[in-house]
Amino acid sequence: MPFLTVADVLRLPVIAAGLPRVAAGEDQLSRTVRWVHVTELLDPASFLEGGELVLTTGMPHPADPTQLRGYVDSLADVGVAGLVVELGRRYQHAPQELVTACRERDLPLIVLARGVRFIEVTQTVHALILDAQGELLRRAQQVRELFTSLTLRGADPEEFVQAAADLTGCPVVLENLIHHAVICRTAGPPDGQVLEAWPRRSRTAPTPDRAAASGPEGWLVAPVEDRGRRWGRLIMLPHASGPPIGPEQTMILEQAATALTLARLTGRPEWDRRAHSSVLLDLLHWRYRSRTEARLRAEALGLPTTGHRLVPVVIDHGDTADGDTTVTGHLAAELPISGVKALVGDLSEHRTGLLLALARASAWQPVVERVGRDLRGTFGEGLVVAVGPGVTELSQVTRSFREAEQIADAIGPGTLDRPFHVASDIGLPELLYSLRDDVRVQRYVEQQLGRLVQHDARHGSDLLSTLREYLVAAGNKSIAAKHVGLSRQAFYQRLRTIERLLGNDLESGAHRTQLHVAVTALDVLGGTDGAARPASL
């Protein structure tokens, strides 16, 4: 056994022979017994350190109820595991004053109806305690070797937290200083309820200087540091129906917290940003088992969902960077300063995801415009900010993020003059630009315009430009001729040549539509040398 409890001691034959009866503190029998102390002193607390099981015949106990209560208070204050009183010498039955005092202090009181040899009790219990301590030392060595191995190979923080959860069999949470649950891992299937109302619950559990039980829920808490400063903490949540926190769980959490501190010392990983990226990707691909699990995970990172409008944003920044500053890092630093609640993380190497949580009554456009202008001013005009539809349910974010990605895919070099883009900005050129890698579009362009492009290449002519201006003018030959600086007769001659080469009737609205799509696709594909894309296209 990893440690002895009062209940374990009562089951030992050497104690069972005394016919033990629990007279008080029945719900505290899971307390750990660190040692057994035999004493007949009236003030033994000065010789105790806590965790001892005190054995006595009751000979020195005072008759005065007030003094007897003081005796119990001194034992409870020092934190003894329990009090065992052997009947027959001083008492024939446990005095009611003693029972009452123990109940008031929630101190286990065990009465032995028969005499036992206290020396045999101490020898037996101490031998078991020493064996358990030896086993704990061996276990500690194994745990230390495991975390050392993870540290040496540069494991991710998720691996350290998962190892702690597997070793303890309990949920383990890594949180930062503002009580955001950065990583949550369980020994079995994910348990979303672990994070229910996380920031509020977390604030009720103070951070001790080293791993120790804390807060009303009895969490085991260990600090995690970063170069001598507190970064956050590692928390183990005991199962409600499971055994209490013991030395082994404490040792494991301390080892895990130390390994995480070393990981921060060696690499300064952006764990908060990784956590945001993980949640955003899980939302984008909807990897959650339920809406509740998604909500709890987002809220545990500080994103309010209930009563808010959620606005997904995709920023396509290519290789853009300003020294050591990335778009994701810039947003992560600037948004909290402006009071905007959001998740910010990397969706891919060249894209950043942003999920804004705004009050439903407020307008999202000014916020996104400020973000877009700030990013374009910092990282250049080539950056694209695409905004998906605002939603009120977290389960709808996946579809909205997908739409934002499609918008980002469609924004080409000719439409980069706005701080942000929405679905209504997607016209024919943008649609074709998003399909630029589709072989069917490329084949369509070649079928419609191939002969004309080849003719221009062989003869040095510019019939393609003539056709483009004619199509932009919606078939108005006079306007188109004026735009290209030709007489109407010369312009008409060029149109007849184009009709002959393409085999199309340019008077036909259907044929003009087909050619307009083909010319637009050719422009966005970059298939014409020096052909500037008209603003109207």
Image (spheres, grey):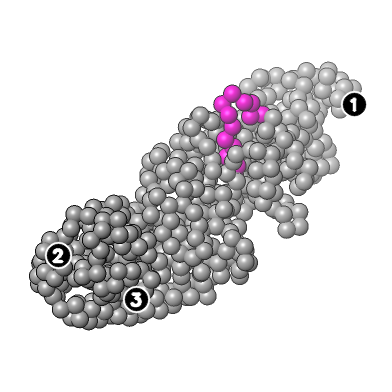
> Can you give x and y, in whole percent of width and height, for residue 481 in the image?
85, 23
Determine crowd level at label 1: few under 14, some 14-19, many 20+ residues with C-alpha closer than 10 A: few
Residue under numbered circle 2:
91
Going from the N terminus, do you reach mark 3 or mark 1 first? 3
Give the residue at x 60% y 58%. 270
Which quarter of the picture shows residue 83?
bottom left
Q: Amino acid at mark 2?
A: Tyr
Residue 178: image location, x then y, percent: 56, 49
Q: Magenta part of the protein: which range?
A: 353-365
Residue ID for mark 3: 136
Q: Is residue 358 magenta?
A: yes
Q: Which callout, 3 or 2, points to the residue nearer the camera?
A: 2
Q: Nearer the viewer, residue 186 or 403?
A: 186
The three-letter code of the residue at mark 1 reads Gly
Task: Please tell me in which quadrant of the rendered image residue 97 appears.
Answer: bottom left
Is residue 187 one of those drawn in magenta? no
Identify the element where label 1 is drawn. Answer: loop
In the image, residue 448 lies at what x, y percent?
65, 35
Question: Under tag 2, what secondary structure?
Answer: loop
Q: Tell me what residue is drawn at x 78 percent, y 30 percent.
A: 535
